[in-house]
Amino acid sequence: MKLLRVGPVGAERPALLDESGTLRDLSGVVPDIDGALLADEAALDRVRTAAAAGDLPALDAAGLRRGAPLGRIGKVVCIGLNYHDHARETGAPIPAEPIVFMKAPDTVVGPDDTVLIPRGSEKTDWEVELAIVIGSTARYLETDEQALAAVAGYTIAHDVSEREFQIERGGQWDKGKNCETFNPLGPWLVTADEIPDPQSLGLRLWVNGELKQDGTTAEQIFPVAEVVRYLSHFMTLYPGDIINTGTPAGVAMGHPAPKPYLRAGDVVELEIDGLGRQRQELKDA
């Protein structure tokens, strides 16, 4: 299934994109798309049954805002430097273990919402990423099978980053990762049954129509199952948590000088196979 949330900020309602591409209203079946729904197999069965029956009301998608496909996100865990080609372009050594940092849930916005360039920023960068959506509580997992069983589905994350704040201003990476609007998410939450192999997905990102990133999750240093298993030994993962799994080569930081960092007026578009497409216009904060 392709689950999403549509409507004004703070008043999104649950929806489903059916196999014909028609947007369907789910508000009569479930109150929202969130961790509570993903952990409730009976509720998910009601959604599947209603979708199969074909009697969900159609929504007019014209002019309808797409919000983040998940409400009430618990935490956003991120994996840094998780692609072989990205490590090569930045000259960084391959990490022996996943590099872990956090983004606050309030950085999450809709897939087509405005992204704000922070005040004083000269090095705002783009990063297309596969995002894992957790569907069941995960603690001290031992196998890849257990890890994948905890995954409800996948979506697209744009891990916007300010490189000066992240790298040159001391402390941890969090300062360059938690600026407002720095995690567009969506458009859909695609359930795991539709993505049989998360290690064979193409990722692409354009800036002002120019292709900047064109990678594949096959390049991940730590694949999806290993990331979920690993994290479960350091924190409890709950339904409604998000894991951003890193970005392939092609970020602005990896370009030769002068590096083409983002500016107000730029338009970023990104997509992942089977997971849809995002589009954001950049403005000054």
Image (cartoon, rainbow, N blue to C red):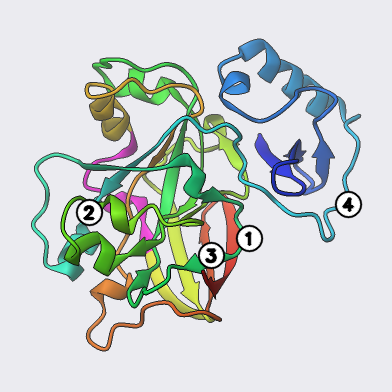
Which residue in the structure is indicated by mark 1? 112
Instruction: Measure how far apart labels 2 and 1 are at the Cα level.
Output: 26 Å
Which residue in the structure is indicated by mark 2? 81
In depth, the one of 148 and 65 nearer the eye is: 65
- Local crowd size for mark 4, using a 10 Å CA cut-off: few (<14), some (14–19), many (≥20): few
In terms of sequence position, does the residue under pointer 2 or pointer 4 come before the other? 4
Of badges 2 and 3, nearer the viewer stands 3
Q: Is residue 60 above or below residue 102?
A: below
- Disc count in the image? 4
Instruction: Measure how far apart labels 4 and 3 are at the Cα level.
Output: 25 Å
- Would residue 19 be found to the left or right of residue 164 on screen? right
Of badges 2 and 1, nearer the viewer stands 1
Going by the picture, which residue comes out furthest to the bottom?
258
Which residue in the structure is indicated by mark 4? 60
Q: Does the segment drawn in magenta span residue 237?
A: no
- Local crowd size for mark 1, using a 10 Å CA cut-off: few (<14), some (14–19), many (≥20): many
Q: Which residues are magenta?
A: 215-224
Specify the amino acid type for callout 4. Answer: Asp
Instruction: Measure how far apart labels 2 and 3 are at the Cα level.
Output: 23 Å
Which residue in the structure is indicated by mark 3? 115
